[in-house]
Image (tube, rainbow, N blue to C red):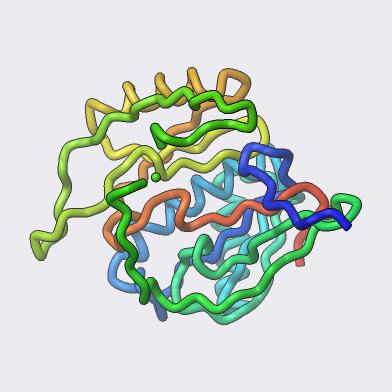
Amino acid sequence: MNAPRLPAEWEPQSGVMLTWPHDGGDWALMLDRVEPVFVHIAREISRRESVLIVCRDAALRRHVQQRLREADARLARIDCRLAPSNDSWARDHGPITVLGRNGRPRLLDFTFNGWGGKYPAERDELHALRDADGRPYRLVPLPLPGARYNADGERLPATYANFLVIDGAVLVPTYDDPQDAVALQRLQTCFPGRAIIPIDARPLIEQFGSLHCVTMQLPAGVLGGLGQH
């Protein structure tokens, strides 16, 4: 029996999951600022693959569908489903997909403990790693944008490494910073066959995450043809 395999994010996908922000979660005080970011992400993904959007209730689903219609998203590739949610960090609560026997996908459920565990990492994250042939990986350094802080003086996690790979494109968080262009150019060298699409992620980092954190890729074979529901 073949052991389950976790597919890489750059392998073919059937879609990406988003959990839409609402006024009962972490984004309540800045919903008007963060929702356009979700609209931008959903629109760009829908032009290339399916989007599974989790909505708190039917009223939010109608609102989301209207916003995406106004943004000229590909509605035929968007499926809005109803489920309660505390926040929008799909990377934390979305399913982890592994490929089992004959390449069939299995969606793993798990309990997320809200980042309760912290572990030392001073002996890591890349120079010591080797591929299957014993060769070192080619490491491409990404710049850091200028430091950004919230109203309480806490530094926000502005980083270009929080990008999302989808079929045919890479969505890259940007921060209205001079280093944005450098990061986009370097990532283009890493993904020469994909379009590099900037997404203004400044609202997202207010909750200490960025673009990759609010998405969860679903490998090929997970989703069938999607339509409006």
- The residue located at (25%, 35%) in the rendering is 144
Q: Quadrant of the N terminus?
A: bottom right
Foreground: 154 or 123?
123
Number of callouts: 0
Q: What residue lies at 48% left-to-right and 54% top-to-bottom?
A: 38
203 relative position to 178: left or right: right
Q: Nearer the viewer, residue 87 or 129?
A: 129
Q: Image point 58% across, 40% down: which residue?
A: 44
> In the drawing, does residue 143 fall left or right of residue 17?
left
Residue 41 percent location from the top left of the image: 52, 47
Residue 224 point in image, percent of width and height: 84, 55
Up-down relation of residue 107 to residue 214 (above or below): below
Q: Residue 150: in sight, yes or no?
A: yes
Q: What quarter of the picture does the C terminus occupy?
A: bottom right
Provide residue 161's location: percent of width, then percent of height.
Answer: 39, 40
Q: Identify the residue at horizontal 78%, vertical 63% (top origin).
A: 106
Residue 64 location, quadrant: bottom right
Give the percent coordinates (x, y) of residue 168: 65, 30
Q: Is residue 194 above or below residue 34?
A: above
| Residue 226 appears in view | no
5 displayed left or right of 125: right
Q: Residue furthest front?
A: 134
